[in-house]
Image (tube, coloured by chain):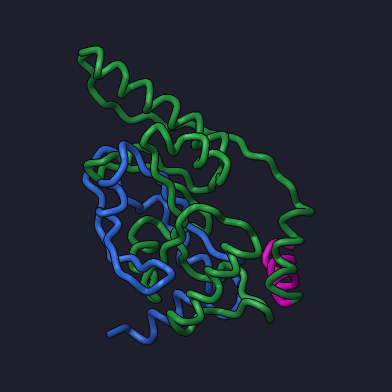
Amino acid sequence: MHDEKLLTQYNYDEFVPEKFMRWMRFAESPQLGERAPDFPLWYLDGSETLLSEIWSASLYTVVEFGSFT
Amino acid sequence: MNAMAEKYEDRNIGSIFLYTHEAHPGENYPHLTSMAQKTRHAYDLQNLLGVSRPILLDALDGACHRAYGSMPNMTWIFNRAGIPVYKSDWSDANSVENALSYFLDVSERRKAKERLAPFRVERLDYRNQDKEAFYIGLMRSGQKAVDEFSKAFS
């Protein structure tokens, strides 16, 4: 289901430049004004939804990306 | 960001927190190896740090996060058609609220039958920098997270 190397690289185990800098790709992110890519997401109870279901539910939707750390 | 979300929710503005990967893995919150662990960390974000917005989980391989530039704490605003109208490489409530205020005004102008055409603009916004609070946050993850951050930017 998942590429094990990708899983390991994305979920890096230490905050060192050679492991986290590869993910700083904001300059390559989707353009404003163009249809954005859609992805499955999961609620904390395990139920699945789509990002498109989230953004289509409101006039505008604010999505903050982050984690506990 | 929670207060801003509550302030605008009755104006048809949705807000979510999308859980990605551990930017600063430490002894208490190590790197993610399963969705079950990711769910536990997200519950702690909700219960210990008080994130009141709906929290959704990205796939373990960060498919969504990576497609949007994979910055550790970025914010995007989408319209109902799935068009991103704002993106910021860091999350700041003042910046987001400023954008929302603008877009809500655009909606009102459209209702008033103004003919509007989109254009792109770049702008440099400014956020508060609270190093003490940041290091307290790192310490929640563990001393390892503090030491690695200090070393990375020394």
**Residue at 25% across, 50% down:** A36
**Quarter of the image that includes the N terminus of chain B:** top right
Q: Quadrant of the rendered structure where residue B147 is?
A: bottom right
- Magenta-drawn stretch, dominant element (helix, strand or loop): helix
Q: Chain A takes which shade in the image?
A: blue
User: As rendered, which of A3 and B106 lies closer to the eye?
Assistant: B106
In the displayed structure, B67 sits above or below A6; it is above
User: As rendered, which of B4 and B153 lies closer to the eye?
Assistant: B4
Q: Position of residue B106 (x, y in %)?
A: 33, 22
**Residue at 57% across, 56% down:** B51
Q: Is residue A63 left or right of residue A49?
A: right
In the displayed structure, B31 sits above or below A23; it is below
**Residue at 30% across, 48% down:** A55
**Quarter of the image that includes the C terminus of chain B:** bottom right
Q: Quadrant of the rendered structure where residue B57 is?
A: bottom left
Q: Position of residue A49 (x, y in %)?
A: 28, 63
The image shows a total of numbered marks equal to 0
Q: Position of residue A39 (x, y in %)?
A: 27, 63
Q: Quadrant of the rendered structure where residue B134 is?
A: bottom right
User: As rendered, which of B151 and B50 lies closer to the eye?
Assistant: B50
- Which chain did the image draw in green? B
User: As rendered, which of A9 and B58 lies closer to the eye?
Assistant: B58
- Range drawn in magenta: B144-154
**Residue at 74% across, 47% down:** B130
Q: Is B74 included in the stretch rendered in magenta? A: no
Q: Is residue B128 left or right of residue B37?
A: right
Q: Is B149 included in the stretch rendered in magenta? A: yes
Q: Is residue B149 left or right of residue B75?
A: right
